[in-house]
Image (tube, coloured by chain):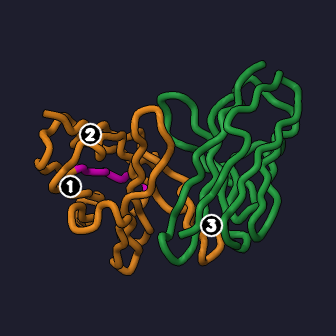
Amino acid sequence: EIVLTQSPATLSLSPGERATLSCRASQSVSSYLAWYQQKPGQAPRLLIYDASNRATGIPARFSGSGSGTDFTLTIGSLEPEDFAIYYCQHRTNWPPITFGQGTRLEIK
Amino acid sequence: EVQLVESGGGLIQPGGSLRLSCAASGFTVSSNYLGWVRQTPGQGLEWVSVIYSDDSTYDADFVKGRFTISRDNSKNTLYLQMNSLRAEDTAVYYCARRAAYTSNWGLYFDLWGRGTLVTVSS
């Protein structure tokens, strides 16, 4: 079973700064990786799919990169509404879906 | 409006059964991949079950033999039948729809319900 490890666990930044979140897979997942944002009391929201494609309606400040085992979610200039928890998720044969443990992005 | 609305959660004793429902509107469940994802209080996301458009189903190892995913196309509704419930099944259960615009192999969820809380406790 492939394990996704996200780092850091918590990231403290100020609005306007650039955020870089990491997701590392224990084995290659090719480019089958997504990123979600979750705010308290809300369902997750799909941000990035297939490693680098923005989902419908997602602002351009969100970008994804990587392939194989190392992936990055970058938020170009943090807006106040971006402070949330971010999860990566991969798609493989079995189990078909696995999530990382999340990175909390908090206001510094 | 395109949405998913879960219902059926609540307090249940260990060993009991519960059926969650997820009513879809604005699209047809029969032609989509749909899944259940849960989130334990204060914790991360955990995939539970998925049903594909060809009716094949897959369940996480920790629910095999206890939970069953199904759908009723006439009611445009997804279900999760949960039997032999354990304390560790306590979580918010979300239903979600696969993003159809991704790669053929991609299985990512672009539409989520608001979730329904299941609490397993005596």
Camera-side mark, 1 or 3: 1
x, y percentage for residue A79?
Answer: 78, 27
Quarter residue A90 falls in: bottom right
* Tag 2 secondary structure: strand
Residue segment shown in magenta: B20-26
Q: Which chain is orange?
A: B
* Tag 1 secondary structure: strand
Identified at 82% across, 42% down, the residue is A20
Q: Residue furthest top?
A: A108
x, y percentage for residue A81?
Answer: 70, 27
Task: In the rendered structure, find residue B82 and report the number of the disc placed on it.
Answer: 1
For disc 2, the chain is B
The amino acid type of the residue labelled 1 equals Met
Left or right: residue B111 compared with residue B65: right
**Which of the two discs, 1 and 2, labels the residue nearer the N terminus?**
1
Q: Which residue is mark 2?
A: B118
The amino acid type of the residue labelled 2 equals Val
Q: Residues within 10 Å of mark 3 (few under 14, many from 20)?
A: few
Q: Are marks 1 and 2 in contact (CB under 8 Å)?
A: yes
x, y percentage for residue B34?
Answer: 41, 63
Q: Are marks 3 and 2 in contact (CB under 8 Å)?
A: no
* Tag 3 secondary structure: loop
CA distance for labels 3 and 2: 32 Å
Q: Which residue is mark 3?
A: B101
Location of residue B47 with respect to A59 vertically, above or below? below
**Residue at mark 1 shares a chain with residue at mark 2:** yes
CA distance for labels 1 and 3: 31 Å
For disc 3, the chain is B
Location of residue B9 with respect to B65 vertically, above or below? above
Q: Which chain is green?
A: A
